[in-house]
Image (cartoon, rainbow, N blue to C red):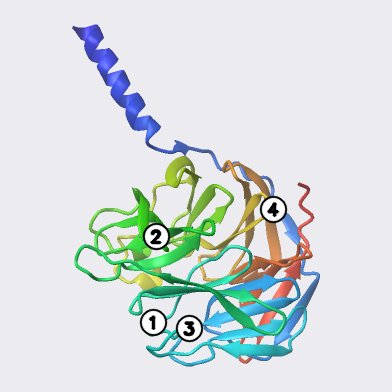
Amino acid sequence: MKTFLLYSLLLIALGITSCTSTKGKNDLPEAIPISACDSLKIDQTFHLITWSIKDNRICFATSGINDHFLSLYEYPGSKKLFECGKIGQGPDEFITLNAGQATDGNILLYDIMGRKALIYAIKEDSLEITDRLPLYNDAEGLCKPFTFITQIDPTSFLMKIDDATVSSWEIADLEGKEITCTFTNAFRKPGTSYTPFDFIQCINDTTLAVAYNYADRIEFYSIKDRQLHPLITMGNQSDQSELKDYDDLKSYYLAVVSHSDYFYCLKSSDGTEDGNLIEVYDKTGKATAHYILNKAVSSIRFDNEGHLVGYVPDIDQTILYRFRLNFKI
């Protein structure tokens, strides 16, 4: 009887383990100091919600209630080539403006109240809408509270949902309005605000990286057959949900981008919303490189020459610092 009980408990434990991620040890290599090789200045400021560099063009999307929220510039350079975007309720107009992440260097914007998402392709002298996608409702007929949308492939999207009690993901075919996966975020404490548990999501091929804004924690998931499967978790279980004033939240991860077969994670070294640490992970969640930039930046992208480009908002201009990381693949 005792043997049977032990065997049953072992099976239960194995079953639980198979549904959770492996706790990994974050063995980051020693940080390598990197200085900016040059900088670019643009005589415009942005309330940035997303941006993209593609070939010799750079596009910024800015929040607010004003038209022309998309701006296209030469890259490298500072000449404005095109601007577009209209606030309103007409076709291709936005009532509420939110940003996601599209594939192929495109720009994804979505509108909760308008129940739609638009994907813009970056052209030589314009931005072209290539996809118009509907958003879907919850059981009460309201558009779900999507807080980020990441394109997986031409038809599949990872929908980040933060409601009053829980954070979760859905993998959806927006054109076919089919949901193939629902997965609850296990780190957020039940009944708490999502703000202390907010995170950045980034997809590289079939791997999802989830880096937390206000926790020293990063998770990796496999995307297979339009389902999410936990791979490995780095960091710890500590959070800041006990803080009464969220203005006191200490920042950790600020941005994550994929380049080649790797994730590049921008991290704050002092808890502010600017960072100078770059952690590099492969698609299995293994730490492969670590850098300290000589300039603190608030967001990062890669250009087609392989530079890591750091975004810095200034009083009356935007500064872009370019770094050559010398990472051997």
- The type of residue carrying mark 3 is Ser
Q: Give residue 96's mark.
A: 1
Give the Cα separation between the discs numbered 2 and 1. 24 Å
Instruction: Say which of 146 and 128 sits in front.
Output: 128
Give the labeled residue for mark 2. Answer: 176
Q: Is residue 15 above or below residue 105?
A: above
Give the labeled residue for mark 4. Answer: 260
- Residue at the image position 52 percent from the left and 56 percent from the top: 152
Q: Quadrant of the N terminus?
A: top left
Badge 4 element: loop
Callout 1 touching callout 4 (CB < 8 Å): no
Q: Residues within 10 Å of mark 4 (few under 14, many from 20)?
A: few
- The type of residue carrying mark 2 is Gly
**Residue 185 in sight here:** no
Sequence-first disc among 2 and 3: 3
Q: Give residue 63's mark.
A: 3
Instruction: Say which of 123 and 12 sits in front.
Output: 123
Sequence-first disc among 4 and 2: 2
Residue 105 position within the rendered picture, expressed as x and y whole percent measured from the top left: 63, 67
**Residue 71 in sight here:** yes
